[in-house]
Image (cartoon, rainbow, N blue to C red):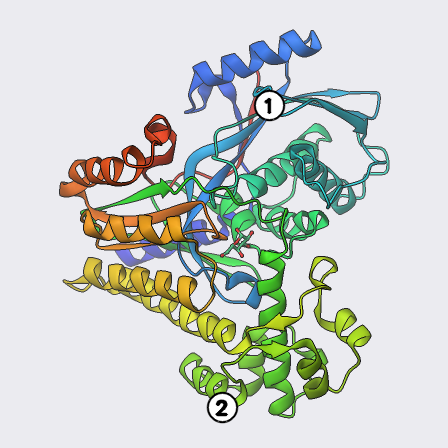
Amino acid sequence: MFTDHMTLICHVIDKMADLPPPVQNLAEAKVDHDRYANIKEKFVKKYNCEPKFYARAPGRVNLIGEHIDYCGYGVLPMAIEQDIVIAVCPTSDNQLYLSNTDDKFRDFQCSMTNFEINKAKPDWHNYVLCGVKGMTEFISLTNPVGMQCMVDGCVPNSAGLSSSSALVCCAALATMQANNQSRSKKEIADMCASCERYIGTQGGGMDQAISFMARPGTAKKIDFNPLSEEDVILPEGVAFVISNCCVEKNKAATSDFNTRVVECRLAMQVMAKSKELQWQECKNLADLQNKLKLSLQDMAGIVEACLHKEEYSKQEVCEILGVTAEKLAETSLSANTLHVEKFRLYQRAGHVYSEARRVEEFQRICKEVPSDAAQRLGTLMNQSHESCSQQYECSCTELDDLVNLCIKSGAIGSRLTGAGWGGCAVSMVPSSELSEFLRKVKDGYYVVRGLESRVDEALFATQPGSGAAVYIQS
Ligand code: GLA
């Protein structure tokens, strides 16, 4: 009887990603009603009418599995409470009106169907346009309704907490609701991962997946191709703390992110070629593993055997693959990495395969909960940071300093989270030592660096939050 009940619950939870995001009356929703009243007030002031509904999509913190989603490997994020909210009133004039509660983001207006997404200068409204375009095409709307929008965000920007994806997801959800359409969380998440690439960054699907599929109280293991999710219950007695090193990094504004994506692709192509596979038919490092029918551990051996530690020049890669530089640009590069001449393939592929193993191990420990679970998870987080910093080179001095300080201040594990090159660390801290930890990190990082005024938004404990939703103004 008990087992049947459990199976039923699991089945229902399993199916939740196949449902659309929840639509609820605002008055009944468990939200900060003062915040929504404030957004509404600004909306009324701007547009002289009331919003009909609010779309919200959360940011996320990734606990482990960095820079491996776009290689086809599973990741382990949880949604955070901080989110993007868009108050919307549909209009009949086919225009998109954007305003932000924060004046530093300037107003913008364009047609719902005819606009350019500026990759060279990724201003805030371009992320909204990605979501609008993605959803309009996805549901084949030739004549979408217009929208007056007031956007309010509290996900720190350029901090590795996925503020940009939350904005894309929220805009897509708003467009769907305004047009009285409904699609499953899974479908929307998949679509949002693709449409965010209009901005030029070749990210994976982690941020969009967790923004839609999150559930309070649980982290998620997210897998791709096809997209799926599974609850990961974190051990008791620990808290997860986010700390921002306050170095800002907008991943769409430089080529660093796409260079890593390209290095992983080239590593996969060079290994595939040396294993006499059709390298142009391999999709990513996970696909290569599947085609070779090997374990992740075996793949570490393939990296050793097929790749050298020294940098590869573009010419060397061309010679190995037997293509011209023009052909390589077509098969392997992105628009903003055409200028890159040197690639580290051994280090990048080494990171990906080892990080994919750490994710599996992390999930296994959370399932089995051995007596030293927290210690073992902490060790995996530390190893992940070391690999991101040394092999993947996506950290920076400030972030490395902050991670070290977090460990010294009592964290069992600490690592950079998100794209890196700045932004946040996530630390696992015994709950009993949380206040002491926060004090030490505040003094040792923020006070020392004259960043004391930023502590409230930059250093906080977090819980697994809920996913995207629509609230109807009653
Ligand atoms: C960004 C991308 C994600 C993922 C992370 C790094 O957030 O949007 O898809 O690649 O970086 O793990």
> Which residue occupies 44% across, 82% down?
300
Q: Which mark is residue 305?
A: 2
Q: Which mark is residue 104?
A: 1
Task: Decide: is 52 above or below 195.
Answer: above
Quadrant location, the N terminus: bottom left
Where is residue 400? Give x, y as percent: 35, 54
Q: Which of the two residues, 17 or 102, is positioned nearer the viewer here?
A: 102
Total marks shown come to 2
Q: Which of the two residues, 173 or 299, is positioned nearer the viewer here?
A: 299
Q: Is residue 454 visible?
A: yes
> Which residue occupies 57% across, 13% down?
40
Where is residue 472? Give x, y as percent: 57, 21
Residue 178: quarter of image: top right
Task: Decide: is 104 above or below 46.
Answer: below
If you read the primary sequence from the N terminus, does the residue marked by circle 2 or circle 1 appear first? 1
Query: 350 left or right of 281?
Result: left
Q: Is residue 5 visible?
A: no
Q: Amino acid at mark 2?
A: Ala
